[in-house]
Image (cartoon, rainbow, N blue to C red):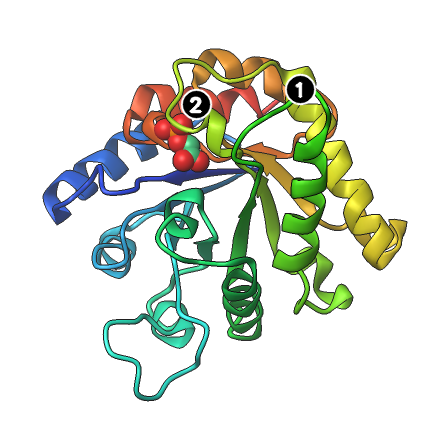
Amino acid sequence: MKKLIVGNWKLYINTPQEGKKLIRDIDKKLPRGLKVEVALCPQVSLAPLLKSSYGGKRIAFGTQDVFFEEGGAHTGQTSPKALVSSGIKYVIIGHAERRREGDTDDVVAKKATTAIKAKLHPVICVGEPTRDTEGAYLTYLTNNVVSSLARINAVDASKFTIAYDPLWAIGATEAPSPRIVAEAVMFIRKTIADMWGRERALKVRIIYGGSVNAESAVLFAATPGIQGLLPGRASVNAEEFTNIVRAFQK
Ligand code: PGA
């Protein structure tokens, strides 16, 4: 399984012009002989346009949410089919900033299954809001993982990615230590193994997101178990983002 670096552009990029320039800059700076999968996720109103104007092959495109129904009377939503038919490959689901606006674990589970069915690759975000010393966050994380994956069929283990993206680490001044992240990633994999068995659990790619930059990426890349990153702020800086990719080339 390839490592995955997926940039969440959030609402940092708001025009096609800005998006095209950033993509050009990133494409130019990406290392030769790319060994990792690189995906960029602009907001949904820009993603298809930016994908179609990108002439290269090295960057895959994603977006930041999708609806859980295939079609019908749902004003203001985006269907998986609309994304797939525009060449979009990835979709972030259940990001803390979406959960904050009402996406429950069940909504996340529905979105993830509809996306997989449509042949999108969901990057399903999980993570506890806060840490405590008694370990209550582990109970939270278990429930979060179990219910977010509840509707996914175990045979689809390789068709999605989990991002451990704890709320407390998003938008912080620095990323937590790789040891803290690696322990959580191991815990998530164990939780999936309890649901689906070890063999299937090993097929799920688990990445990390939360205040990642080029410097911390070097440490994360050297830590076993962390199979990629989901940078936010650092993904809209071509130099920083491509250095994150470079860190995972080794
Ligand atoms: P950040 O965002 O890298 O800007 O902290 C990460 C995220 O929201 O997953």
The answer to which of marks 2 and 1 sits earlier in the sequence is 1
Looking at the image, which residue is at 40% across and 20% down? 172
**Is 192 situated left or right of 71 in this image?**
right
Q: For the residue marked with disc 1, what is the amino acid? A: Ile
Residue most extreme to the bottom:
72
Looking at the image, which residue is at 37% across and 52% down? 64
Q: Distance between the residues labelled 2 and 1?
A: 14 Å
Q: In the picture, residue 235 is in which quadrant?
A: top left
How crowded pointer 1 is (Cα within 10 Å; few <14, some 14-19, many 20+) is rated as few
Q: Is mark 2 within 8 Å of ligand 1?
A: yes
Looking at the image, which residue is at 34% across and 88% down? 72
**Is 172 situated left or right of 53 in this image?**
right
Q: Quadrant of ligand 1?
A: top left
Q: In which quarter of the image is the C terminus?
A: top right
Is 89 situated above or below 209? below
| Label ID, residue 211 | 2
Looking at the image, which residue is at 53% across and 50% down? 123
Total tally of numbered discs in the picture:
2
**Residue picked out by circle 1:** 180
Residue 220 rendering spot, x and y as whole percentages? 61, 20
How crowded pointer 2 is (Cα within 10 Å; few <14, some 14-19, many 20+) is rated as many
